[in-house]
Image (cartoon, rainbow, N blue to C red):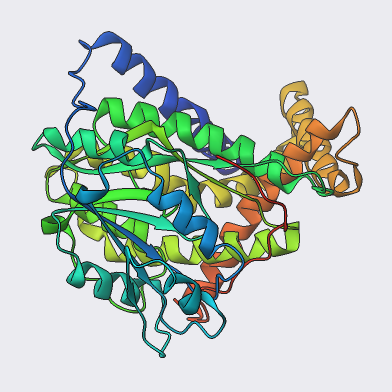
Amino acid sequence: MLFWKILFNTSILIIIYNYIGYAIIVYLINKLKRKSAQFAVVSFKPSVSFIVAAYNEQTVIGKKIINSIQQEYPLSKIEFIFITDGSTDKTVSIIENYPQIKILHNSERKGKSAALNRAIAAANNDILIMSDANAFLNKDAVSYIASHYISEKVGGVAGEKKVLSTINDVEGVGSREGLYWKYESFLKKIDSEFYSVVGAAGELFSIRRNLYQPLPDSVILDDFIVSLKAAQQGFRIMYEPKAYASELPSISIKEEKKRKVRIAAGGFQAMYMLLPLLYFWKHPRLTFLYISHRVLRWTLSPLCLIFLFTSNGVLAVTQKDLFFSGIFVLQIFFYTTAYLSQFISSESKINFLKNFGYFSFMNYSVILGFFRYISKKQSAVWEKVQRPSETFSV
């Protein structure tokens, strides 16, 4: 029984540490240490290159362009580069209506990493800001991001991602994903205050051009790897919540699954490519955050959920102990509710129970992503996810 008790205790500790414990530790350390200097100075207006990679985005590309050129930033200091490799719809012709946009088009579609390599090679400025075609920014996003570069210690800046709720969100994807990103935003904030963000989101992030390392075409999570390779060189990746990108959620759980599994497969690829980040003696603070926030979530935590349930079941049956029996009953309730939550209406007063299902769904997607990665079936070319046709203003 000793083996099962060790497995039970280890599993529950890793899960608690990964999702709650590490955040508490970092938050308390941030509170105890002297408040770090704020690098952002909004009056600092360096020249920037604003890059958008778009593939068959005719439904949103016009709005994206208008959203971009309406940034409250000196237009003489922004170079707009839109790259449209492989697009076969009207995306290219729509962009051509805007002479202030430099368009790079290639009929061959190699994926976003290849597109970024081409765009950055063509960029003329030292500060690069990347954004997705379906993500819309607040009007002073560029100002807040660029302001951080007044400090030479800053190698990049991660903006905030906001997932919008929609009218016809029958399955509650938007509200669940939105809640997840509020949690992620909190972690990015405390990570940044402690030392550095560990992985930016592609909806809105920035990097110094001299820190950008060209990516292999096979890379899946370009934003994650680009930002962490910059941090690996000894620079901080700051978090800027006043610069945010808003996007609509996937139209259904089935569509969201495409995203989640792809991200998980990309996570395993990224961990292999970023093995030097595990060398704790080289960059202890970054490694601590990287393992606590990312590595555990993509590796041990999903496994520990399985180990916890299995070991708890064995102990509940073999040990006459109310503790083990009580925890096992709670687990059965949790996973039963997680399964049944798909049948709960988003309008129901108990729709918060859908969070149980979403947590399980995310960890299940990580497991699927692992098998997708080792089977080498995950292409770097993005399979577009269907989103609601609703419009919104920023």
What x and y, as percent, mark residue 190?
36, 26
Q: Residue furthest bottom?
A: 107
- The image quarter containing residue 108 is bottom left
Q: Nearer the viewer, residue 162 or 189?
A: 162
What x and y, as percent, mark residue 326?
78, 26
What x and y, as percent, mark residue 151?
11, 33
From the viewer's perspective, tell me whether residue 275 is left or right of residue 307.
left
Image vertical order of residue 374 relative to residue 142, above or below: below
- The image quarter containing residue 29 is top left
Tell me what residue is drawn at x 33 percent, y 34 percent: 239
From the viewer's perspective, tell me whether residue 254 is left or right of residue 149.
right
Image vertical order of residue 9 relative to residue 217, above or below: above
What x and y, as percent, mark residue 310?
69, 47
Image vertical order of residue 308 relative to residue 109, above or below: above
Q: How many marks?
A: 0
Q: Nearer the viewer, residue 334 or 222?
A: 222
From the viewer's perspective, tell me whether residue 161 is left or right of residue 242.
right
Instruction: Specify the quadrant that holds the C terminus.
Output: top right
Q: Is residue 55 visible?
A: yes
Instruction: Specify the quadrant that holds the N terminus.
Output: top right
Tell me what residue is drawn at x 20 percent, y 10 percent: 34
Q: Is residue 379 visible?
A: no
- The image quarter containing residue 250 is bottom right
